[in-house]
Amino acid sequence: MLNKLLLILVVAFGAKLYFENSSHQYSDNQQDLNQLSTQKLLTQEHFAQTERNSFKCDGRQYCSQMTSYEEAKYFLKNCPNTKMDGDDDGIPCERQFNRFD
């Protein structure tokens, strides 16, 4: 009887330690994933900001003259006389860049 009780206590204590360790590892892994997601987002925002800063109105008006969707959006928003939004929905060069937001 005492052996069974001792065995139950050892198993219970082992299980408690196992689950405490598992939840701690899960928490650490979740924190690592959150940090990686934040770093990726910041990197994407940095490159997008750098790309936007490199655009400037230079007289181009047509989709065929654009090299990216972001460039077309910049031109549509900031430059005069653009001809990239035929249906006037604010989405430039829909067919060229397959954008139908």
Image: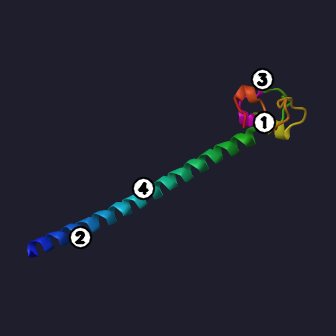
Rendered residue at 28%/67% (across/down)? 17
Q: Earlier in the sequence, mark 2 or mark 4?
A: 2
Residue 86, horizontal then vertical, whole percent: 85, 29
- Asked if disc 3 and disc 4 are in contact, CB closer than 8 Å, the reply is no
Q: Which mark is residue 29?
A: 4
Q: Which mark is residue 64?
A: 3
Residue 10 shows in the view: yes
Q: CA distance from mark 4 to mark 1?
A: 39 Å
Q: CA distance from mark 2 to mark 3?
A: 70 Å
Residue type of the residue flagged with mark 1: Ile
Query: Quadrant of the image for the C terminus?
Result: top right
Which residues fall within the magenta stretch? 64-71
Q: CA distance from mark 3 to mark 1?
A: 15 Å
Give the quadrant of residue 90: top right
Q: Earlier in the sequence, mark 3 or mark 1?
A: 3
| Residue at mark 2 | 13
Residue 43, horizontal then vertical, whole percent: 59, 47
Rendered residue at 23%/66% (across/down)? 14
